[in-house]
Amino acid sequence: MTETVSAEGAARRRYDAIIVGGGWAGSALAKRLGAQGWQILVLEAGNGGTETWPGYLDSLSTFYSAVAKVPNSAYRPNKAAPSPDVLDLAPVPNPQAGKPEFTAHGYFVQNGQLPYGTDYLRELGGAAMHWLGAVPRMLPDDFATRSAYSYGLDWPLTAEDLQPWYAEAERELGVAGHAQEQKELGVVTDPAYEYPMHHIPQSYIDQYCDARLADQVIDDPVAQLPYTLRTFGLPQARNSTPNPAYQGPYRIEGAVGLPNYGERCVGNASCVPICPVQAKSHPLRLQAAWPPSVTLATRCVVTRVRATSAGTVTGVEYRTYTDPASPVSRSYLAEADVVVLAAHAVENARLLLFSGLANASGQVGRNLMDHPTLLNWALAPEAGGPVGPFRGPGHTSGWEVFRGGPGRRARAPFRIEIGNWGWGWATGAPMSNVATALGIGGDKDGNVRPDGVFGPELRRLLGSSIGRQLQLQIAVEQSADPGNRVTIDPARHRDAMGNPRPILTYNLDDHVRTGLFAARLVAQEIFARLGATDYTDHAPHDGVPPLGHFVHTVDGQTLDLAYSGAGHGAGTHIMGTDPKTSVVNADQRTHDHPNLYAIGCGSMPSIGTSNPTLTMLALALRSAAQIHRDLAAARRPVNVRPPEGTSTERPETPEPETSEPETPEKEKVTA
């Protein structure tokens, strides 16, 4: 069991490694290094408590009382360690030509042409405390878009390099997936590999779409290529039935027989932010398995990484607070042989910039990415009956064929997710349907309109319309662009505690906009073949544009388009082999400092069309192996040869002990 200490207690010791952030990457790193005997300190800016039953109940009551059920709505605001929220953005009515169509309030300072609509959570467990749990692997050609398709950046690693680490990460997460489908997709290359758990079954909507569209060919008019539709299941970090075919060749601490991660998914359709039966995986599970050599200190906001003039880092400065409602805090210093930044991509960049470290390349904060997500919504034909929305995880299947291949040269690739939650994301259904049917909000005073319906007619209308809702969420790849960046201005923009707020400059290049354009045309064709009525509308109404709105033209055809943030922040300290053009190497060690690591999605030179958490976790486990080697090498005793002619006789003394921990066989990675 890990030790939880006060901020003052954490500062009284010296550690082998300090990890900044208690999300997926930091939690996995601490578990792995702690199991190898190293003394680890994890500093978490956010609150603890949700790992306890009273804390969990508090998050539930906070969620129940929230008017807007957005991802962060289950967690109380924190003035000392604020989080960005999707509610911080608002459209500008009748915007001036050439001016941004949005305003931003809250933690982020946004000065880009388009909004960066991604949020995250500064809470013990990080953004995984509100995530959906989708964990697909990246395609092989996602790692080399510059070489293959002349856009973006190449990785210093290949998909094959990450295969054993993907498997390690899938065991840690407890992934449910269909191995044969993923092998056919080309993302799993081991013919004997099986997922720890059976795949989550297809939803009724998945089956409805697959029965009508399987093997149909759709032409992408932008790429000018045909694509054959076939649904693939989504690997997910949520409990299903343990898979007896799983062999677990990549052993981790405590791995004996089949994995058993707790209650199974029962399809409550409320994965974001909280799974009612706690079937969705989150980092608190990893933290429960931390050994005693791992020390956790929550409510500790790291403010600066300290370094010597020679470039070696010595530790971190941090401030601790006692009340999340107040920024009043005290300052402390913790020292270690290795410092690992494992916060969000934006937070890692902010901390490096304020510390003045790892930026000889000038790339810290640059290449900020997300998956701009295009929402499309329609009503299935009434004659076909209900299609069964609002059951199961957010999505369980999708069309993967648009993710790769030569079409990437003409437009950004995209991944089509078949939504299981009706028009929830697009319009706020089903509550928005109730309001519309009742005629509520029909005038400026919010009065009931005379055309509202009640009684049996209300029941019939809602049953018919809500039960036929179809939604496609289409995640589009955004490639690295140095103009999309995080900066700071401590003289003008600080948070309540006095730390610099992130300043975001964000836009979509033509390649990405054309990908969104193509995705919209494909969605229109899919709805047409389903016989569904397309209600998608991204145009401004009464002079008010939707958030993320832009107009794009391809071959004389013009579309109003709007995107949403996916919560997939990446870039800002990208990896590479050249210190002049990248921040970290393939092990996520900074080029400029031999004992400073920046790990997480911020290291990724590209994100393809896959939710990035699994790749992030695979990279973190890979880095853990290198950090272990670093620490072991530093502890290895050195034999010094005496000068020529000097006697080598010495008194009988015991051999010096080495502090290098042994690596248990079960912790060694087969790579």
Image: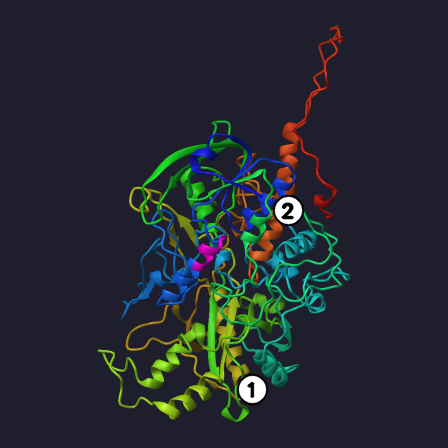
Q: Magenta segment range?
A: 51-57
User: Mark 1 or 2, which is nearer the eye?
Assistant: 2
- At label 2, which amino acid type do we have? Arg
Considering every residue shown, the one lying at the far left of the view is 445
Quarter-of-image position of residue 121:
bottom left
Measured in 3D between alpha carbons, the distance from the residue under mark 1 to the one under mark 2, in whole angstroms, is: 45 Å
Total number of numbered discs in the rendering? 2
Q: Amino acid at mark 1?
A: Arg
The front one of 235 and 546 is 235
Task: Give residue 15's position: percent from left, percent from top.
Answer: 54, 33
Q: Are marks 1 and 2 in contact (CB under 8 Å)?
A: no
Q: Please tell me how crowded label 1 is: few (under 14), some (14-19), or many (20+) other residues with Cα within 10 Å.
A: some
Q: Secondary structure at mark 2?
A: helix
What is the x, y in percent for residue 335? 49, 31
**Relative to residue 358, is residue 28 drawn left or right?**
right
Helix, strand or loop for disc 1? helix
**Where 327 falls versus 451 (above or below)?**
above
Query: Would you say residue 56 sits in the magenta stretch?
Result: yes
Q: Is residue 105 left or right of residue 241?
A: left
The numbered mark, 1 or 2, whose residue comes first in the sequence reads 1
Quick one: quadrant of the N terminus? top right
Residue 97 visible (yes or no): yes
- List the single residue furthest toward the front: 54
437 inside magenta stretch? no
Q: Position of residue 606 (x, y in %)?
A: 55, 56
Horizontal placement of 277 versus 201: left or right? left
Q: Is residue 560 visible?
A: no
x and y percent of residue 44 in the render?
A: 46, 45
The dot on residue 88 is none
Reply above or below: 60 against 453: above
Residue corresponding to mark 1: 529
Which residue carries the number 2 mark? 622
